[in-house]
Amino acid sequence: MHFIETRGNDGQHPKRVSFSVAILVPIASFGGIYSPEVLPDLGETFLQSHINSNYKTLARAVLTAFEIDVHTDIIEQALALYDAFDDNNNPVPVVKVKDDLYVSELWHGPTRAFKDMALQPFGTVLSSIAQNRNEHYLILAATSGDTGPAALETFKNKANVQVVCMYPVGGTSDVQRLQMVTEDAKNLRVIGVNGNFDDTQNALKHLLSSKAFKDTLKEKNILLSAANSVNFGRIIFQTIYHIHSYLELVRQNAIQSGDKIYLNVPSGNFGNALGGYYAMKMGLPVEKILIASNNNNILTQLINTGAYDLRTSDVIPTTSPAMDILKSSNIERIFFDLFGSERTKELMLQLDNEQHYQISDSELKQLQSIFSADFCNDDEGKQYIKDAFSNGYLMDPHTATCFKVYETCREKSLVTMVYSTAEWTKFSPVIANALTGEEDAHDIDALKSIANEAGIEIPAIISDLFDKEITQTTVIEKNEIEKEILSFL
Ligand SMILES: *Cc1c(COP(=O)(O)O)cnc(C)c1O
């Protein structure tokens, strides 16, 4: 399979690249990204034949259908990392919460958030490709809290790769920050930036497209790459769990194979939702994809009105910070798929230059035939956490946003798959507040009170963080990012 550019070709970038090139050099002409030229058609027989497959077997089959240029040994090594998830035979449990609402738990990996689903195997794939090509890569990551820990974890001590991870100071939970600043490996550097997530993401995008920066790296024999959610090396692994979750519903007799379901996804950069969209296009029976946002409801606006407008809104800090995002990068791939490269270029360049765009009525209809959207504010989210807990289900504030959308966006009473993107341990102060009313607790105290309320233990992987030595202490202003990165190299 090959990958083509979302904004068309400028005569300088390759028009069409292999999977390994698309993941090593993810930025295409005019600031676009690479998208699959065609998607494999999996269809009903594929689903039937994998009804009894475990996660890795299914994953192998999906990756094979994509015909990527990565050796099967490397794919095996990458998929083996799922063996270290809580249940070595099933990294993604699907849990019935009530009626026709099921939750697919994507956070049973080493950093307790769904980023591990893609980044764990991605680290192995990228490092192996770099070694085979005898090239050295700098991975830049901007994180709102979960990508950072997952990227550091996967690239720690991996050959031919160095990682610089930037996080917004005060924009992450204690646990997320500790997961990053206690990482100790020669090839990793963690940088706190005074600013919000969009500031760090913009700085990163700027560096990724800066020729001067790349030239400086070249002198050091280093190439630049990114592990952010636009990287197709992550997206490909995010198609698999949608298919797995569907098959789990069949296995649990919640549906019959072929029945349509709703996918209900808490969204920020739209990687998770894009994985669902591709799964649907590859033949998964999906009625619609329901997009949940928090008060940063730019995706709700887009899907309900066709307008995307950054002029009037600043990022609002919420209790679901991994979704405190206004520039949702993977929407670009949806537009490319629906409207083609010329139109995508027009819309995306208008967004870059004028901070807004409006799609046409017919384009909006197309979008709405696939997606519905709503947003959940912090108070509502708190109530959903409380209600679910009294029904025996403990969930994090990102997952909670889906529960609102489950109530407001479904037109049919079909089985609905909510994607749970973080364990309760990562956002404990918010959850403790919802459950007991305690305010402004530090993570460690909130963890204890939730564990107490729920009659469960704090997982050691989390409680151990509080005793680990802090090795990464750099904090800088946003205009110092480039200098800081170069000094690390
Ligand atoms: C990253 C993240 C999201 C948003 O996922 P996208 O794929 O960027 O839309 C939601 N919840 C949590 C906990 C996350 O870490």
Image: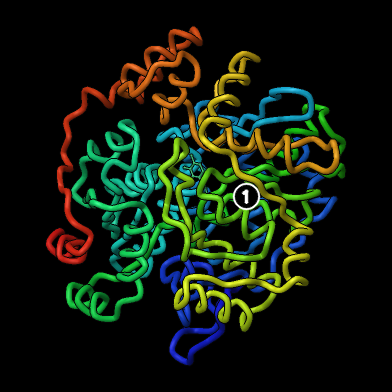
Q: Quadrant of residue 36?
A: bottom right
Q: Residue at x 83, y 28 (%)?
A: 253
The answer to whether residue 444 is above or below residue 288 is above
Q: Residue at x 34, y 56 (%)?
A: 141
Quadrant in which the C terminus is drawn:
bottom left
Q: Position of residue 275 (x, y in %)?
A: 62, 53
Q: Position of residue 207 (x, y in %)?
A: 30, 70
Spot the residue most to the left. Answer: 487
Q: Is residue 77 visible?
A: no
Q: Residue at x 28, y 27 (%)?
A: 465
Quadrant in which the N terminus is drawn:
bottom right
Q: Quadrant of residue 299?
A: bottom right
Spot the residue most to the bottom. Answer: 11
* Between 291 and 474, the one nearer to me in the picture: 291
Q: Which residue is mark 1?
A: 60
The answer to whether residue 271 is above or below residue 306 is above
